[in-house]
Image (cartoon, rainbow, N blue to C red):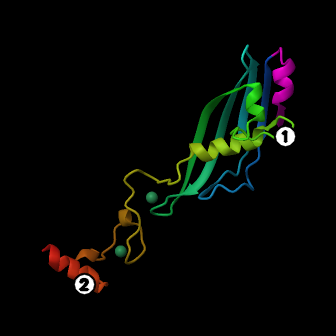
Amino acid sequence: MQFDIRSFLESGRKPFEAHFEADFSKADFGGYSVSTPAVCDFTATLTEDGAELLLCVRAHIDAECARCLEPLTRDYDFTREYFVRDRDLEDSDFELPCNENGCLDLEELAYQELIFEVPAVLLCSADCQGLCPICGKKKAAGCSCQPADNAAPADARLSILKQLLS
Ligand SMILES: [Zn+2]
Ligand SMILES: [Zn+2]
């Protein structure tokens, strides 16, 4: 969905409101996916100095724990505020996804904000112990592997370092 900020700044006497769903099922988020459409609300209000924009995004994400690889889901619900003046549209550093005609791409904006909102590393729980490096099973499930500390260091340089430290 496109929002024409330039026209709105010129003649937006009435607030603008839009409710839309953004399909991110094919979008690239790196470590997670958004298979159901994100539900977004966007409003724009004109003030004396410019336009106040408000974007609310509700999204459900699917990912896997960065330590134990268990599937996990998270729900996000957040709001971002922006303030846009006429001169921002001419500024090459303007950070909102706006084309040369002054139209804001609302789906793209929601996509960018979702990337900012979701942490790069997701864990099933803050104290997830991850996988056993020997057998590959979840440590929390318990395994009979011996801790690696007692094994001989694989790297000779490490063993020299150990001798120096002791
Ligand atoms: Zn985990
Ligand atoms: Zn193990």
Q: Is residue 42 left or right of residue 11?
A: left
Q: Nearer the viewer, residue 110 or 23?
A: 110
Q: Is residue 147 left or right of residue 24?
A: left
Whole-percent x and y of residue 93? Answer: 69, 40
- Is residue 89 shown above or below 99? above
Whole-percent x and y of residue 149? Answer: 24, 75
Mark 2 falls on what kind of element?
loop
- Is residue 43 shown above or below 143? above
Q: Nearer the viewer, residue 75 or 56?
A: 56
Q: Which residue is mark 2?
A: 152
Residue placed at 16% from the left, 79% from the top?
163
Q: Which mark is residue 87?
A: none
Q: Quadrant of residue 47?
A: top right
Q: Quadrant of ligand 2?
A: bottom left
Residue placed at 76% from the left, 42% from the top?
107
Q: Is residue 151 left or right of residue 95?
A: left
Q: Nearer the viewer, residue 43 or 51?
A: 51
- Name the amino acid, label 1: Glu
Density class for disc 1 (Cα within 10 Å; few <14, some 14-19, many ≥20) is: few
Cα separation between marks 2 and 1: 63 Å
Whole-percent x and y of residue 125? Answer: 43, 51
Which is closer to the viewer, label 2 or label 1? 1
Whole-percent x and y of residue 64? Answer: 54, 59
- Is residue 29 shown above or below 20? below
Q: Is residue 141 left or right of residue 57?
A: left
How many marks overall?
2
Residue placed at 87% from the left, 37% from the top?
101
Mark 1 falls on what kind of element?
loop
Residue range in magenta is: 1-14
Q: Which residue is mark 1?
A: 100
Residue placed at 75% from the left, 41% from the top?
97
